[in-house]
Image (spheres, rainbow, N blue to C red):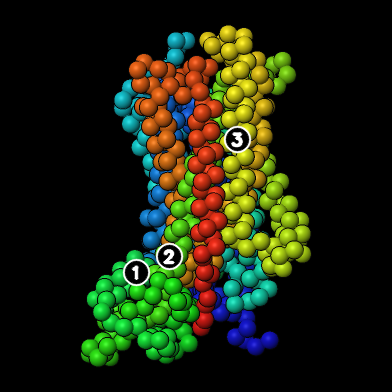
Amino acid sequence: MGEDDDYTNDGTVDIHKNPANKKKTGNWRACRFILGNECCERLAYYGMSTNLVNYLGKRLSMGNVAASTTVTNWSGTCYATPLIGAFLADAYLGRYWTIAIFSVIYALGMTFLTLTASIKGLKPRCDKSGCQATSSQRAACFVALYMIALGTGGIKPCVSSFGADQFDETDETERKKKSSFFNWFYLSINIGALIASTVLVWTQMTVGWNWGFGIPAVAMAIAVVFFFLGSKLYRLQKPGGSPLTRIIQVIFASIRKCNVKVPADKSLLFETPDEECNIQGSRKLEHTDKLRFFDKAAVESETDHAKDLPNPWRLCTVTQVEELKSIIRLLPIWASGIVFAAVYSQMSTMFVLQGNTMDQHMGPNFKIPSASLSLFDTVSVIFWALIYDQVIVKLARRFTGHERGFTQLQRMGIGLGLSIFSMVVAGILEVARLGIVRKNNYYDLEYIPMSIFWQVPQYFIIGCAEVFTFIGQLEFFYDQAPDAMRSLCSALSLTTVALGNYLSSLLVTVVTKVTTRNGHLGWIPNNLNRGHLDYFYWLLAALSIINFFVYLWIAKWYTYKKVTGRTN
């Protein structure tokens, strides 16, 4: 093996900005720190957010609709701010330093949230009649929550991509390990979520919110320490400059040359003569025939070479044009994930509110908080992630002949189909629950004599759907993103969750406004025994069915990217 074979060929460097040595950096030796960081960070996030709807409702004196929409709006923001972190990572800071900086902001937000639930004057005053929160106490809580939203935004789009960066795509052995990394990455998320939905939710409901928020704050501090401990082992991709600038340059150049004819011979389109790409940290992309209007940006004219270097606002390389095409091709796939995310968001809102009305006893003396039922989603994810990686891939490979068992698009499609059944099962349960209410005149009874564990199937099915759709999305958006836009595309995939939460809030708001006309209580009143939450689940099921068939059409149209050359 030559000396050059000791170093990666994907442009990665070590923490000292030297070429990354394969024997000393990256691979699973570095990923254990990334997975540990993610597990602790997710424990902190879910430990704080899983039961947030109950905290807002009971401690900050909000009704069902207000608490539900506040949680989904905040959660949506947590999945929208990744666009900020992703841009900074791809353009200027790189993924390592972006994670480091935003982790500190995140930890400060968690600390402040703990203080709002612990310190007299910041925490609401409570007595036997309930809690009375002042406007300043609510404001302090929201400041802490949105500091967390900003912090998590810098981390989310970078961690999965940073972990995948530890495997050299040009090395066949390492490339095969990358697909397994995404499964283990999602597994680490759910191990953290499992602890959060059991131990921490129980702590919040029985010991107190000061401890319930304090433990997640400590977990976040541990996550920061864990991340820095692996610094010497990490492989770092160089930031490639502003991806938005390159995209805008292609659009401007295409419009400027709208009357130019694209040559039939695509080899005549402008590209750098060297094997290396002129975009830092990126490989060249092969030309594709779709979206041909943008090829005009790569057509050379006599005025394009007035100086030695062409003006990128007038003439762009084929790779730069293909970057824009790649993003445009991703958008329909991205949009198809919004309805799935709206279904997923019900676990932290409507499922919890539905569970609040049911018998939560486990034995004569122990009650399980309704928010803790999400542990069955987590158990489902852990179970199916292991089964998928060790069993399903091998079985599917026999029939499909595909290296990964299913293509990424097939994997996501299976998850979208499963999500339909989760809403159907939730709707059937609510029909049965309301049937007991009507039959026995339990309209004003706080807890219906129906075990909360009837909710387990709807959580379990969503967990299975996550393994197919969310892990498939992580891998798909990393693989199909241009090399220098991977954080941005990971952020793009996360914004489906943001928009899914916003869609859920919009649906709740519209449904409430429409169904409460003329003095009616509506589908989702504060007393769910007098409402029709099942109608809301049927609505989401119908939207999911429509979305599934639209996705099938989009997936059939999609063209995977092709890479050539090597990074500079």
Q: CA distance from mark 1 to mark 2?
A: 9 Å
User: Quick one: 285 or 27, which is closer to the camera?
Assistant: 285
Amino acid found under the numbered disc labelled 2: Ile
Residue 515 seen in the current view: yes
* N-term-proximal mark, 3 vs 1: 1
* N-term-proximal mark, 2 vs 3: 2
Disc 1, disc 2: CB below 8 Å?
yes
Instruction: Find disc 3 in the rendering and name its residue.
Output: 424
Please provide percent x and percent y for residue 457: 67, 34
* N-term-proximal mark, 1 vs 2: 1
User: Quick one: 456 or 260, which is closer to the camera?
Assistant: 260
User: Quick one: 117 or 176, which is closer to the camera?
Assistant: 176
Left or right side of 208 for 56: left
Instruction: Find disc 1 in the rendering and name its residue.
Output: 247
Amino acid found under the numbered disc labelled 1: Ile
Please provide percent x and percent y for residue 234: 56, 66
Mark count: 3
Residue drawn at the location 40% of the way across and 80% of the way down = 318
Tell me the crowding category of disc 2: few under 14, some 14 to 19, or many 20 or more residues within 10 angstroms, Cα based: many
Please provide percent x and percent y for residue 531: 49, 20
Residue drawn at the location 38% of the way across and 61% of the way down = 88
Element under disc 1: helix
Is 542 above or below relative to 363? below
Instruction: Find disc 2 in the rendering and name its residue.
Output: 327
Q: Quarter of the image containing the N terminus?
A: bottom right
Is 225 above or below relative to 433? below
Q: CA distance from mark 2 to mark 3?
A: 34 Å
Element under disc 2: helix
